[in-house]
Image: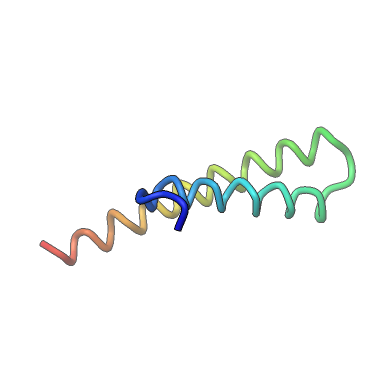
Amino acid sequence: MIWKSHLLSMILYAVFVCIVLALIRRNDKKSQIRYALFLFLIMVAGGLLFGWFMYLFTL
């Protein structure tokens, strides 16, 4: 692992996955950027919500 923070590792992974998926799935530049940003927000928000949900079971 590069960092001790799982959050930074998750964000870096999300950036790379979103870039690759946007390049593969969309044709023009504007829709690629919008799709990549949308995927990035969904992946980071989903990771944070899932992490918060798992934290509830450790209490």
Q: Vertically, is 57 above or below 26?
A: below
Where is residue 49 drawn, in percent x and y? 36, 52
Q: Which residue is at the far bottom?
A: 57
Where is residue 26 drawn, in percent x and y? 83, 48
Where is residue 9 drawn, in percent x and y? 47, 51
Residue drawn at point x = 58 percent, y = 45 percent = 40
Q: Which residue is at the far left?
A: 59
Give the left or right position of residue 23, taking residue 54 as reference: right
Q: Nearer the viewer, residue 19 or 31?
A: 19
Residue drawn at point x = 42 percent, y = 54 percent = 47
The mark total stands at 0
Give the left or right position of residue 14, taking residue 29 as reference: left
- In this picture the colour scheme is rainbow
Where is residue 31 drawn, in percent x and y? 79, 38
Q: Which residue is at the far front?
A: 2
Dividing the picture into quarters, in which one does residue 57 lie? bottom left
Q: Which part of the image, by quadrant, shows the N terminus?
A: bottom left
Residue drawn at point x = 27 percent, y = 63 percent = 54
Q: Which part of the image, by quadrant, shows the C terminus?
A: bottom left
Residue drawn at point x = 57 percent, y = 50 percent = 14
Q: Which residue is at the far right?
A: 27
Give the left or right position of residue 30, taking residue 46 as reference: right
